[in-house]
Amino acid sequence: MALSGAERARRCREKKKAAGLSHKMKQKDRMRKKACLEYIFSLLKSLIPSLDEIIIISDGSSSQFKNQYSIKGLSILANQFSMTLSWHFFATIVHFRIKWPWAFFE
């Protein structure tokens, strides 16, 4: 019997939950991100010793929420490497095609 993709994903989540792997996997993922960011900061500092500020540009509010832990980790690393970080978030909107009764174009 062939299972749908959603059913396979649900069964996989149940197996991981039963084994208690989801928490461990999240911890490993955070540790990988931290190690990668530390490597990038040390590489930047070794290549450009006079580096004082890093500017991060991001798109809308959804990525701000999604990356809140990365931003927290970046600020800790900036203090560790004595750098200044600045964030620039762009405001984005979703364009909907709305038919207004008084509109002459569609």
Image: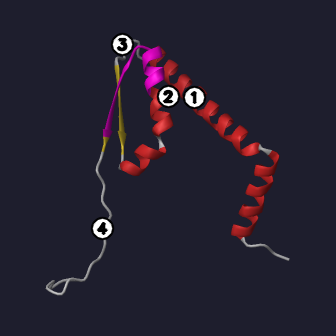
> Which residue, given by chain and number where applicable, does mark 2 sit on?
73
- Residue 20 appears at what percent x and percent y? 78, 44
- Residue 51 appears at what percent x and percent y? 37, 17
| Mark 1 vs 2: CB contact within 8 A | yes
> Looking at the image, is mark 4 or mark 1 earlier in the sequence?
1
How far apart are labels 2 and 4 at the CA level?
Answer: 33 Å
Q: Amino acid at mark 3?
A: Ser
Mark 1 against mark 3, which lies toward the viewer? 1
Bounds of the magenta span? 75-88
Q: Is residue 4 left or right of residue 105?
A: right
> Which residue, given by chain and number where applicable, does mark 1 sit on?
34
Q: Quadrant of residue 96?
A: bottom left
- Residue 45 appears at what percent x and percent y? 45, 16
Is disc 1 placed on a helix, strand or loop?
helix
- Residue 26 appears at what percent x and percent y? 65, 40
Up-down: is 45 above or below 19? above
How far apart are labels 4 and 1 at the CA level?
Answer: 36 Å
For the N terminus, the image quarter is: bottom right
